[in-house]
Amino acid sequence: MAKIAIMGCGTVGYGVYRTFMMNSETITRRVGERIQVAYALDLREFPGDPIESILTHDFNDILNDPQVSVVVETMGGLHPAYEFTKKCLLAGKSVCTSNKELVAEHGVELRSIAMDMNVNYLFEASCGGGIPIIRVLNSSLTAEEIEEVTGILNGTTNYILTSMTEEGKDFAVALKEAQQKGYAELHPEADVEGWDACRKIAILSSLAYGHHISYKDVHTEGITKVTKEDIEYARLLDCRIKLLATSRRDANGTWVLVAPMMIGKENPLTAVDGVMNAVMVKGNAVGTTMFYGSGAGSLPTASAVCGDVIEAVKYKKTIKTAYTADNMDLISVDEVERPFFVRWKGTKEEAEALFGTLSEIVYLPELDGEIGVITGHLSEKQFKDLIVDVPQVISWYRRGKNEEAEEKED
Ligand code: HSE
C-alpha cells in the first residue's frame, strides 16, 4: 500500500480526494497496490464531510510520516506552497502539483532537488487542466525537433470570449459566471491579463525546446480591451478572437507570445469554445498534433494530478526529462511578420496610404465612419511604428495564421 497526502483541499485538491475514492478499485488494479490518502491538509474545517477523518491543520503530520511517499500540492500561490514542497522533496517524498505559478517561478530548483533526492516533482496538471500534454512533450514526442507550441491555455478567458461571441454577454457578466463555476483564479487579473496563460506557455515551451524559458521574458497581453465591436468585425471576417499562447522556433530564433488574436476557420483552435483548452504541437517529423480537453475545473484537473501520483508511486525513482536549467535566449516578437487586423476610423484610401495593399476590407453598418481592414505581412515593429500617433486606429489584433493550412492552399 502507498500512503499519500494532499496539501490544499480547494477545487483541485478536493477533486483529487474524490477521484481516489471514486476510482479506487481501478487504480489499485492498475498500480498493483492500493493508494491510501492518509492526510488532507487545510486551514478550514469540513464538518460532516468524509474528508474530515483524514483532515490535519499541521503540515508536520505529513512531513514527519515516513510512510507518506507522495504529496499532492494543490494549495496554489507561492507561499507556503514553495516551502512545503521543498521540505517534502528534501525528506525524500515525491510532489505532484497543479500549481503553475510555483512551477513557473521555482520549477527549475524544485526539479533539481527532486533529482538529487531521486524522487519526482511532477506537474502535468499545471498546463491545460486535464489534457495530457506534459507527458506528451516529455515522452511521446521526445524524438521530435519541436517547431511550435500554440494553445488556448486559459479556460476562464476562453469562456469569457465564447460567451461574448455566442451570447453577446458583457465581459463582466461572463467573468462572474466563470468564477462561479470554479474556473477563475482567486485574483481574476491572472486570467484576464494573460498571466496564467503566460506561465503555462513558458512551462510547455521549456519542455518543448529543452531549455528554461522564464515567464518574465514572455510578451503578454490580456483580453480586457476586447470589445463587442471587435468581436463583430471578427465574425464578419469569418474569424474568432481567441487568447492564444504561442511559441515558435525557426532559423531566426525562438519567440513566445500571449495575446488575443484573430484566427480563421483554417485554424482548428477556432472550434475550441467555453472552458475547453487545446494545444497544438508541431514537430519536424510528426507534423501538427493537437490535444483537447477541459482546461480547468475540479475533476479534470484532479485527473492529471492523480495520473502523476500513480506515476510517482509506480516508478519510485526520478523520471528523467531532457530539459536544462539554463535560460533560453528569445528573439523579440517585434521581429515576427504577420498580417494585422485594424479598426480604422476613416476611409479605405487613407488606410491603404498608411499600410499599403489591404487583403480584406469590411464594414459594419451600425458603425458609421469606420472600417475593418487586414494588412499585408508586416513585422510587428514595422506595424507598431506605422500606427504611432495615428488617431484613426481604434483597435488592432494580430491575425494569427495557421501556416500548415496556408502551405496546403498554395
Ligand atoms: N484559471 C485557470 C483557467 C485555471 O481558467 O484556465 C486552470 O489553470
Image (cartoon, rainbow, N blue to C red):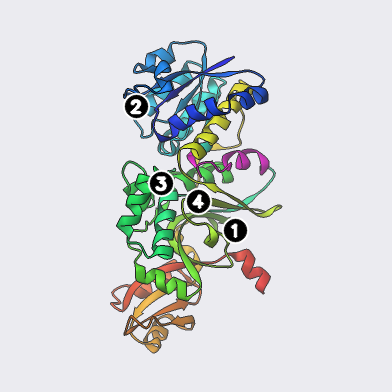
Check whether the beta carbons of the residues at disc 4 and disc 2 lie within 8 A of each other. Answer: no
Write down which quadrant ligand 1 falls in.
top left
The verdict on label 3 being within 8 Å of ligand 1 is yes
Could you classify mark 1 by the number of other residues whose Cα lies within 10 Å: few (under 14), some (14-19), or many (20 or more)?
A: few
Q: Is residue 104 visible?
A: yes
Q: Are marks 1 and 3 in contact (CB under 8 Å)?
A: no
Mark positioned earlier in the residue sequence (4 or 2): 2
Q: Amino acid at mark 1?
A: Ala
- Mark 2 element type: loop
Residue found farthest to the bottom: 349
* Amino acid identity at mark 4: Met
Ligand 1 within 8 Å of the CB at mark 1: no
> What residue is pinned by disc 2?
80
Q: CA distance from mark 1 to mark 3?
A: 29 Å
Q: Which residue is mark 3?
A: 196
Left or right? Give the position of 147 relative to 213: right
Residue linked to disc 4: 276
Q: Residue at x 40, y 89 (%)?
A: 349
Counting from the top left corner in percent of width and height, residue 285 is at 71, 52
The CA distance from mark 3 to mark 2 is: 19 Å
The x and y percentages for residue 58 are: 35, 16
Residue 278 percent across, percent down from the top left: 54, 51
Q: Which residues are magenta?
A: 126-142
